[in-house]
Image (cartoon, rainbow, N blue to C red):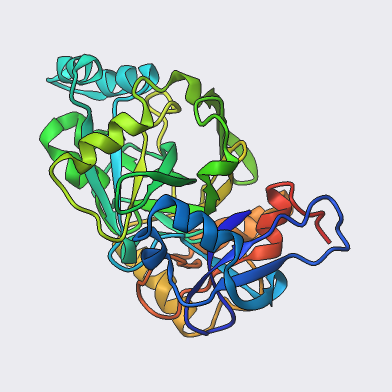
Amino acid sequence: MRLVRFRVGRGEPRSGVLDDPGADAAKPAVITALAALDLPDLLGQPLGRIREICQNPGGQTVPADHAGLLAPVSGRTEVWAAGVTYQRSRAARMAESEHSADIYDRVYAAERPELFFKSAAWRVCGPGAPVSVRADSSIDVPEPELAAVLNYAGEVAGYTICNDMSSRSIEGENPLYLPQAKVYLGGCAVGPWIRPAWEVPDPYALTIEMTITREDAVAWQGTSSTSGLRRRIDELAAYLFREDDFPVGVVLSTGTSLVPDLPFSLQAGDEIRIKISEIGELVNPVVRGKAAVAAAVHADASGKLTKDSPPTSSAAGSKVSAWSRAGMGRQGGGEGPSGRQPASMRAILASCGLLAEQ
């Protein structure tokens, strides 16, 4: 079972449940819409009630082929993130820091975790949407992370993937520049869906893979595991909710264990592919600067890029890169600018091994 946000054509975004079609390619994948709730309303329910609703959504059924995926975050639901929660993150932050490397060592060992606001829902990029590196930054990387989706009470309702885009050059200059290094238009991608917590028996035994493709060749690739997460997810959630309130839930990204070595930096036209076992796969092309993100939204709003679905095969990857270099792509976030073109449900199911590609 996958909890999704989707759109049919240019219709209004909806929330629903995508049932696993299994290995039978002839079996059509179907989304059952939530009858009376959108995702923020659902996360405003107790965990037991969320499970009941997901098992009996009660709404209209939609063939997955007719739907496009949006980021599984909307309305007033925010995205927050934890920092320096893996040994690799600690080492990378210390390596990039010009003057304050010891801060990250102390944060890693401290009782209180580092937590920071990452994105409002409207700014979140969904599957196939372009993410951005800042135009005023010289070293930029994606950070693949397991994200916990928490309800209003801080209970883990499910898991998704977050790409916590980061400027290493800006944060490395001064740790207090972290908000500028982390929080900007095109700086956060979430998706492709939410896997319910009751279907993920051990979130500390998941494999995380990231591949960065440049000009149809692998520019960087790495694999890690959530077993290296220093802090428990319920501990991070407890600190987040200690003196704050999230009445429509919150997405809490748990930190990264994969960071390319210096001086590697993303470039416009790259493709980022993040896969977490039992969760799914999130793919985004890269553009550079706010103007390129705006151009992508404008291109979708004018209907220039609505013919093909965001590709997942290596052959189609060059299309994504070409769109990115041109400052175009699909922007599939929360409740952001109108005209965002969502990603193909069939292509994403196939890329996650849930459906044979046709």
Tell me if residue 212 comes above or below residue 321 in the rendering.
above
Q: Residue at x 45, y 82 (%)?
A: 301
Residue that appears at 59% across and 79% down: 8
Total residue callouts? 0
Observer-nearest of 126 and 42: 42
Relative to 320, is 258 on the left or the right? left
Task: Work out whether 261 lies above or below 184.
Answer: above
- Depicted 354 relative to depicted 93: above or below: below
Task: Give the quarter of the image for residue 229.
Answer: top left
Instruction: Report x, y in % for residue 312.
Output: 67, 54
Q: x, y percentage for residue 277?
A: 61, 36
User: Quadrant location of residue 105?
Assistant: top left
Q: Measured from the top left, where is residue 5 in percent x and y?
A: 51, 66
User: Toward which corner of the image does residue 112 lie, by quadrant?
Assistant: top left
Residue shown at the point (30%, 29%) measured from the top left: 235
Q: Quadrant of the C terminus?
A: bottom right
In the depicted view, which residue is nearer to us: 327 or 226?
226
Residue 102: x and y, percent?
Answer: 16, 14
Residue 213 in view, yes or no: no
Q: Is there any visible trace of residue 350 in the rendered image?
A: yes
